[in-house]
Image (cartoon, rainbow, N blue to C red):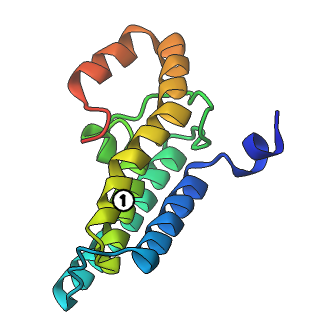
Amino acid sequence: MSIWNKYFDWPPVWLLIFMAIAWVQAQIWNPLSYETGFTTLIGRGAILFGIVLMGVSFVMFQKHRTSVVPKRTPNTIITSGPYKYSRNPIYVADAIVLIGYVLTLGSVISFVLVPTFAWVIRKRFINGEEVGIRAEFGQAYEDYCQQTRRWI
């Protein structure tokens, strides 16, 4: 296992990387700037909502006594709370935080980072996690997948 995978390949690190890219991009090239007090307020609200969603989702892992660590197979499928609406509410929360941050920057161009972030998270984390969960829970997980979207 490389040092990157062991210490840095975590979703919050990826979120910080994408936020840093958005900030640099907004500082260097921001041809379609729209920054207003309203968009900043909405952006901060989105960031707050994302953080609260992360917290509630994390508490659900604690309540069900299962691992929140990415790339580990949980010992149960959580289907209540935010998990009733998304199979990955923590990753959704990360994307919401990124959207909020981009709104506070006032940079239209930076919005391209949001689907790129979602793609990276799916490739680096979600796909592998779902393979492990399918192997562990079989039809129960398939049924959950049929009822609940991956994102929203």
Q: Is residue 2 left or right of residue 44?
A: right
Q: Residue at x 35, y 64 (%)?
A: 110
Question: Circle 1 sits on which residue?
Answer: 53
Q: Is residue 132 left or right of residue 98?
A: right
The amino acid beneath tag 1 is: Leu
Q: Position of residue 64 (x, y in %)?
A: 50, 40
The answer to which of 152 and 117 lies nearer the viewer is 117
Q: Residue at x 25, y 30 (%)?
A: 148
Q: Residue at x 24, y 19 (%)?
A: 146
Look at the picture and state if 59 lies above or below 130. Answer: below
Look at the picture and state if 131 lies above or below 29. Answer: above
Q: Position of residue 75 (x, y in %)?
A: 56, 27
Look at the picture and state if 150 lies above or below 132. Answer: below
Q: Position of residue 140 (x, y in %)?
A: 37, 14
Q: In this view, which residue lies farthest toward the left? A: 38
Quadrant in which the N terminus is drawn: top right
Other residues around mark 1 within 10 Å, as few (<14) / some (14–19) / many (≥20): many
Q: Residue at x 49, y 59 (%)?
A: 18
Look at the picture and state if 38 lies above or below 50. Answer: below
Quadrant in which the C terminus is drawn: top left
Local SS, label 1: helix
Dividing the picture into quadrants, the one containing residue 128 is top right
Q: In this view, which residue lies farthest toward the bottom? A: 37
Q: Position of residue 145 (x, y in %)?
A: 30, 22
Q: Is residue 63 left or right of residue 50?
A: right
Count of numbered marks: 1
Q: Is residue 4 left or right of residue 90?
A: right
